[in-house]
Image: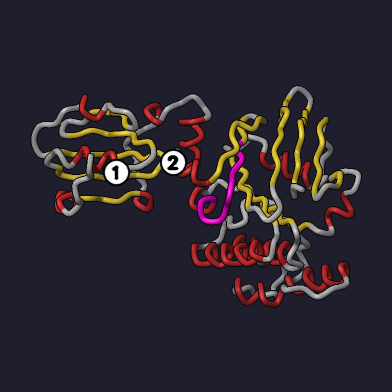
Amino acid sequence: MPAIEVQNLKKYFGKIHALDDVSFSVDEGEVFGFLGPNGAGKTTTIRCLMNFIKPTSGDIKIFGLDAQKKSTIVKNHLGYLSGDVRLYDNWTGRDHILFLEKLRKKRSIARDLIVKLNFDPHIKFKNLSSGNKQKLGLILALMFEPKLMIMDEPTLGLDPLLQNAIYKILDELKKKGSTIFISSHNLIEVERICDRVGIIKDGKIVAIESIESLIEKRIHTARVRFNGQFSKDAFNIDGMEVQQELSDGLILGIHGNINLLIKKLSEYDIKELEISHASLEEIFLEYYGGVGRSAQKQNKFEEDKSVLITQNDLNEVPKLKE
């Protein structure tokens, strides 16, 4: 039995079709990433799952129960983190935790989460930084180790160390058999924790793929500068395209494995090579939006996403067998 089963879900706001015949399922024990550009329908889908808004039509079942008609029962097994954590301004983190424990009438793992996230529970919510508000939201969502965790941008506002702490917590939750449904824009995050992904665009599911398949679709951009002559046409081959010609080099788009590029460059005298990973949004544009990266500006290489390779580095790369 799937943990989540969505069939022909539609949600209209007047003439706006926020969700248009959305169908997907999430297996028990699976970490499922829900991806899409802003306005694609991710949050609307989550709000329907949580019964915060009523669908125009369609069916949603969670653990075999109707998510609308049996919402109260379903929510006993859910943990939820919204994309914008809003709680009681004058309550401390401790106040929120004690309130939920009394409401559920059971102890929680909140104290362990407080330690793991380095969170001070004695500060009023209104005085917390955005990152600490996110920490409190995570603690409240995870404190009862739910069978199903629904999360909208769970590491938003957190530094890399705390992001890793969250990933470890989610790994532990998965090992205990919980299902995790996570909306995210962070491709590295998705690769790190998800088993499969569903991709939504303009209110429609355009793909459901394994992480391995998504990684194969990863796009790179390479800026190459040559010492001496080079052939532009030699780089217009399957899996690679010339996006822009420079005075002493090329800007190339590479689909999938970059070994193809390294093998081709080993035939030339390279002055400089800079490789940049495509953002998740660029992958959407390339594969699901009908717009290639050649339409994007190619003169921006973010320092934290690129690597600089010199000729000495290339000389140490072994020749690939044909």
In the image, taking residue 299 as reference, residue 91 lies left or right, namely right
How far apart are the alpha carbons under marks 1 and 2? 13 Å
* Residue 99: x %, y % from top left: 84, 70
Give coordinates of residue 121: x percent, y percent: 70, 74
Q: x, y (%) of residue 220?
A: 36, 40
Q: In this view, does 19 lie to the left or right of 267?
A: right
User: Relative to 274, does residue 116 appear above or below in the rendering?
Assistant: below
Q: Which amino acid lies under the numbered mark 2 shown in the image of this protein?
A: Glu
Residue 203: image quadrant is top right
Residue under pointer 2 = 216
Q: Name the residue under label 1.
A: 259
Q: In this view, does 141 lie above or below 69?
A: below
Residue stretch rendered in magenta on the structure: 190-199
- The crowding category of the residue bearing disc 2, from other C-alpha atoms within 10 Å (few below 14, some 14 to 19, many at least 20), is few
* Residue at image location 60% in from the left, 74% down from the top: 116
Specify whether residue 108 is painted magenta: no
